[in-house]
Image (cartoon, helix red, strand yellow):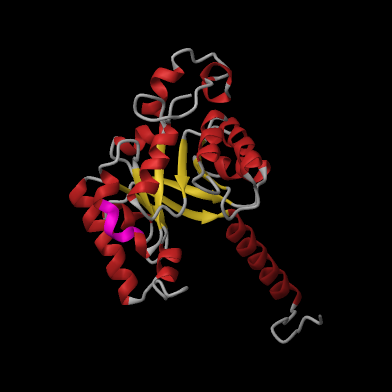
């Protein structure tokens, strides 16, 4: 029931994870058994809604892995429900101000640190009461990453670092680029400069960072100071494997499908 992901990160490790977008417990199990011991369940852009996403934690853990949950929004009820149902590490999208970040931190920690609603003896997070000291230990076990993915958030990185209960900033380069007028242009100089500024501000403030793989792979991001790197997602893995198998099939059969057109 302890937060292994948080322990590994605080020990200085760069933890790598795979995205789970399709909302399938079978896919979750396959990812873990294929070497992805941390799976980030996406309830913002993925197929699974919050309740199904929370159930997917069971599939990840049953296969021997650790789950991170990206919640669909930063509403207090969403955060409370996710934590009560056993999510220990949350990624919270679109946090653009210090006020928003403080509200997230408050919602995710029990008093006196925060105002998380109390139901410790009856929730899955405590093993339905088996973890009798859960309420006293939960504030240390929970890990909260807020997404820095809009230009409005850029001036606040140092302030985010000083908020008790916020453990990490998670850089979302695609939405950040879009907010700067560079949709799908992650190599735009303005975008690169903004990300470099986030990194330097975080280093100066001692703020942990996470992000996704892109122009830099896991090793490059680790060397830049990132402590959580989320790489492949199940949609791309399946699509690329299917495309490769189809290409191999066509080569074996002597088919050239490059000129074929799909008739609507």
Residue farthest to the right, as pictured: 263
Our reading of the magenta stretch's main secondary structure is helix
Q: Is residue 97 magenta?
A: no
- Left or right side of 235 for 260: right
Residue 218, picture quadrant: bottom left
Residue 103 position in % (x across, y down): 40, 41
In the image, is residue 4 above or below residue 135? Answer: below
Residue 51 position in % (x across, y down): 64, 39
Residue 238 position in % (x across, y down): 64, 58
Which residue is rendered at x = 63% and y = 61% of the image?
241
Q: How many marks?
A: 0
- Left or right side of 239 for 18: left
Residue farthest to the left, as pictured: 204
Q: Which residues are magenta?
A: 153-157
Q: Is residue 156 magenta?
A: yes
Residue 202 position in % (x across, y down): 25, 52
Which residue is rendered at x = 66% and y = 41% of the image?
52
Pick whichever, 135 or 187, lies toward us: 135
Pick whichever, 30 or 128, lies toward us: 128
In the image, is residue 194 above or below residue 17? Answer: below
- Left or right side of 136 for 262: right
Which residue is rendered at x = 40% and y = 62% of the image?
150
- Left or right side of 186 for 260: right
Image quadrant holding the C terminus, namely: bottom right
Which residue is rendered at x = 72% and y = 82% of the image?
256
């Amino acid at each position: 029931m302890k937060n292994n992901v948080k322990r590994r990160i605080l020990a200085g490790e760069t933890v790598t994870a795979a995205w789970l977008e399709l909302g399938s417990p079978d896919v979750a199990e396959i990812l873990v058994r294929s070497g992805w011991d941390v799976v980030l369940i996406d309830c913002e852009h993925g197929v699974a809604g919050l309740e199904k996403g929370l159930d997917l934690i069971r599939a990840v853990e049953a296969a021997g892995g650790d789950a991170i949950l990206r919640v669909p929004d930063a509403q207090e009820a969403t955060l409370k429900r996710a934590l009560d149902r056993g999510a220990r590490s949350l990624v919270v999208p679109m946090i653009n101000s210090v006020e928003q970040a403080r509200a997230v931190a408050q919602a995710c920690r029990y008093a006196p640190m925060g105002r998380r609603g109390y139901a410790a003896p009856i929730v899955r997070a405590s093993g339905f009461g088996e973890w009798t000291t859960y309420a006293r230990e939960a504030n240390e076990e929970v890990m909260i990453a807020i997404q820095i993915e809009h230009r409005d958030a850029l001036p606040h990185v140092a302030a985010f670092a000083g908020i008790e209960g916020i453990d990490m900033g998670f850089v979302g380069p695609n939405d950040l680029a879009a907010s700067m007028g560079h949709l799908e242009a992650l190599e735009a100089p303005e975008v690169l400069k903004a990300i470099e500024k986030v990194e330097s501000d975080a280093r100066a403030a001692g703020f942990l960072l996470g992000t996704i793989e892109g122009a830099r792979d896991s090793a490059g991001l680790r060397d830049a100071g990132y402590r959580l790197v989320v790489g492949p997602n199940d949609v791309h893995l399946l699509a690329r494997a299917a495309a490769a198998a189809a290409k191999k099939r066509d080569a074996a059969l002597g088919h050239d499908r490059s000129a074929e057109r799909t008739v609507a």
